[in-house]
Each structure stands twice: as structure tokens, then as C-alpha cells.
Amino acid sequence: MLDENLRINGFLFCIHGHEYCNHCQRDHRNANDDELAGETRTVELDYTDPDAVADAIMPRTPPGVTQRIPGEYIWACKEHRISDCKSCFDWPKLLRQTESRKYQWKTGIEDRNVTLGLLSSMRIELPGSTKLSTEILGNKLTSALNLAQVTEEYEDKFPVNPNDLPHWNDGNVFGAIYRGTSKSIAEEHQYPAFSGNPVYEYAFMDVLQTMMNIEGQIGYGRTAFTLEDRDEQEALCIRILGVHHLANDTPLIMLSYLSLTSHEPITPLADFVKAQQKEVGSVVQLTGSRQAQAMLRQVLYLNSTRLAPAYKPDMRPYEKDFRVSFLLPLWPLSMVNIGKLAYKPGCVLCELESVSRCSSCQSANYCGSECQRAHWKEHKSFCRSLKGGIWRTLTFTNHFDVDGQRHYSVVINNGTGGVHISGKDGQPPANVHGNRTFLIKLQRPSVDPLRAHLYGIDTDKQGILLYDCTRSFSGQVYRETDPKAYEAILQEMLPGGEAKMYRWARRVGDWDLSVCLDRKPLEGPDW
């Protein structure tokens, strides 16, 4: 395998699709320069973004590949299944395109599929077929990471010059980060279920773990780190410059960093490790997925723009290509923030003003037929599960009055012991779902309403509890406030003796839900 090359339109690449590859020990840059025949080449590395060549070719199975000479293969393109396809493999054109966006991926700008994956890892779920522009998706990711770092609390300090900040004297950087992260996770009660690309499921949590590892090592005096995925495709070199006190109990960890890939010369990584071993004695090697590295690069890039121009740290000779940035504590997003970022005020694909709704399930809004057709593949199974369902509007509340005293509904989390009181300030619970359809859980009273009179229990004061999986809201439906809805829910529960059930719902008012009562979810949830 390592002795093989790819030859496409006269250009040579390693078996992974790169000009330069440390794994294959291949360097075809000079040969490809000669093949350019007059094209001006200023890009030092690949003609395309990482893995673009490999992603554009057919698998190594007949008839997708034919061998011309030993050790060299001609691959067919995936789109047209043509060897040496002039449309897909126009390398001079791709070279110019790559030069125009030179190293963008290293400065935190990812392609739309990566951006969608990183958003989903933070539980901001958008349709894979979304028509939102790459710029809008990038802005959503930027907003999400800013919220995760709570940067709005420190806006008066940006752009920041670390030289103007006091040094962190606590000595326990890890403790400050860990207390915040563990507390924020517990307060969320239950992080939303993941439904995106599986390779991104743990990207955000991996970043949290990586940061805690770095901060824990700082406590032991370690200042040099490498972060690499298990397949050794990408790596980050990190040198800690210092830890400062930003505000309250918030540490600001200054660092220099460099991002590398396996299809670049390994010299910068080797120079970094050699210099740090000589300077501080060791380099801490950490493992992190490529998806986690992509998110960490984005965080570091964003924070690098928040440094004052006057800040000029002492850089080492081998750090000429390094960038200076900082880390702040990172928090899982609250459900309110997730709702704001995932909120779709209109069409589910492009967010333009909606003019129609799916006639079968009544749960998806569209700006027109084009977006509706584009979304059908993703929407189909969900739509068919609700087709013909009866949607009933019900009114819920978070309190009831007894003898002049107001009592509030409470959800107690058995895992964390947390107590959640919805809307005690008199305000309706935040709508984190926008116009999206979501699952709710309904639980009837512990005493069967049909037998309550035998125990002298007033059924008008027995509410049916409802809430969503993240407890962004909770409330009760009472017979005296919405008798028709109360009876309709019991009719769905009592024939099978169910104490609880799950149904699809939409918020249609501050205290109103539209619920499809006669259709069960395709799969039973686990909350």
C-alpha cells in the first residue's frame, strides 16, 4: 500500500490523496510543479484542502481503478466515474482556488460540513440539507463558542493585554475550571440527545476534557503540549506563556500554538519537541479527535482576535509560524442559548419567511416547494409517523391556588438532586424550541382520576405533569383550567393503564402547546 501512488491528469499523489505525506513518506511537490508547465506556484502544500483529493475519487475496487504501470493507479472521479476527469481533476484551477483561501482552515475557518458537525456537538441541531450560507453557519458557531466561554461578561476587558492583568496566584487552575464545568453540567439536569453526524457527538466534551488535562498539568508546572488524534492526521503544538487573573475566579491561560497535518513537513513539530525537551525537560502528549481539534482551533482563533495589538510576548526562534491566543473556562450551553441558536423563525432549511406547512404532519414550515422537496429525505420517516394525527391545543400552568395560597409545580432530578421551579417569577418559561416540533413527557396523577373520589381527592387539583427532555419548561394541565385537554390526555393514557406517555408538541403561545395526542413517537425516548 505505501509503495503505491495516485496519478491523475499527470499529477502524482500518495495513496491518501496528498502531495506530501509523512505516513507514506511521499513528496510529489517538485514533480507536480514541473507538470504545471508555466503555472505560478506559491502554495507550499496541497492543491486542495485536507482529504479533498481522497474524497473525490472512487474506492480502490474495480471498475473504479485501473493500473497503468506498477505502483501507480488511475482513479475515477465519484461524480462522473471517469478516469482523469477534466472537470473534477482540473488541478491548476484547484491550485488557484486553494491559493485564494490559503491556510484558512488553520485560522479557524472550517467548511460547512465541519461547522454543522461542531454545532451539533454543542446540541445545536440543524438539518443536514440546510440552505443557510457557510457564513451564517460560521456566525452561529462563533456565537455558540462565545456563549460557551461567557465572553459577554468580559467585553469591557477586550481587547486584552495580559501584561496589564495580575498573575494567577491561586495555583489551582484545574480547580477553577473543573468547578465551573461540573456545576454547569449538573445544572442542565440532562444534556439533549445527540442526533447529528456520529463522529462529532463527543467533540465538545472532548475539548472540555482536553482543557482540563492541560490545566491539570499546568498545576504540576508543565508548559509544553502536543495534541494529536489516534490516526496521527492532525496535531497542535501548544506552549503555555502564563496564567493571568481575568475577572472574579476566571483564569486566562496565555499560549502560543501551531496547527499541523500529516501531509506537511514534520520539521516544525520536531523542532518544537526538541526545543521544549531541552528547555523544560518534557512535552506532555495528549490525544484528541480531529473533530475536537477543529473546535479547539476555532476557539483559539477567536480568542487570538481579542488580544491587544500592544501585547508582544517573547517568542522562540522556532515559533515564527505560531499564533498567540488564550483559553478561558468553557461551559456547556444552556437550553435557552441552544434554543436561540437553533431557533428557526421561518423555513426549516433557509429560515426565510415561511408560507406553507407540511400538510401531512403539520410540523415543518417552508418558504416554498423547493425547500420542501430538498428536506423530504430527512423529513420523510418523521412525517409519516405523524401523518393524519390530531393536533390539540392545550393550556398548561406552573401553579394552582389552594385556600388563597399559590403552589408551584416542581421537578426534582433524582440524579443531581436539583430542584427546578418553572416560572415562579410570574414570567412564562423561555421558548427554546422556537417553531420546531419536540417531544414532551406527560405523567398522570399517581392516583387514578377515575378512583380519586373514593379517597376524597379533588380531581380538579390533580394536574397532569408535562415537560421536555431538558426541563427547559415544566407545568401541569388541570381539569378546572382546560377540561377538554385534560380529558383527552386521560383518554390516551387510561385504556392501556399508562402512567406516562411521550408525544410530539409545538409551542403556540406563552402557556399553550399544540400536541399530537394520537401518535406515538417512532422510538421510545430514554428519559
Image (cartoon, rainbow, N blue to C red):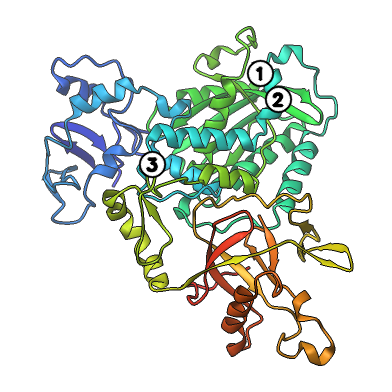
Gap between marks 3 and 1 measured at Cα: 34 Å
Instruction: From the top left corner, tell me how far across and down residue 418 is, in percent.
Output: 79, 58
Which residue, given by chain and number where applicable, does mark 3 sit on? Answer: 352
Q: Residue at x 36, y 22 (%)?
A: 102
| For residue 203, above or below residue 220 | below
Q: Tell me the mark number nearer the camera, choosing from 3 and 1.
A: 3
**Amino acid type indicated by mark 3:** Leu
Which residue, given by chain and number where applicable, does mark 2 sit on? Answer: 154
- Image quadrant of residue 337? top right
- Between residue 34 and residue 205, name the one nearer to us: 205
Asked if the residue at tag 2 contacts the one at tag 1, i.e. Cβ–Cβ closer than 8 Å, the answer is yes
Task: Count numbered badges in the picture.
Answer: 3
Q: In this orientation, does residue 273 appear?
A: no
Q: Which mark is residue 150?
A: none
Asked if the residue at tag 1 contacts the one at tag 3, i.e. Cβ–Cβ closer than 8 Å, the answer is no
**Amino acid type indicated by mark 1:** Phe
Q: Residues within 10 Å of mark 3 (few under 14, many from 20)?
A: some
Q: Secondary structure at mark 3?
A: loop
Q: In this orientation, does residue 47 appear?
A: yes
Gap between marks 3 and 2 measured at Cα: 33 Å
**Amino acid type indicated by mark 2:** Tyr
- Image quadrant of residue 357? bottom left
Instruction: From the top left corner, tell me how far across and down residue 461 is, in percent.
Output: 78, 75
Q: Secondary structure at mark 2?
A: helix
Specify whether 438 is left or right of 479: left
Q: Residue at x 38, y 41 (%)?
A: 352
| For residue 61, above or below residue 110 | below
Of the numbered discs 3 and 2, the one sitting upstream in the chain is: 2
Q: Residue at x 80, y 59 (%)?
A: 419
Which residue, given by chain and number where applicable, does mark 1 sit on? Answer: 158
- Between residue 186 and residue 73, name the one nearer to us: 186
- Between residue 510 and residue 194, name the one nearer to us: 510
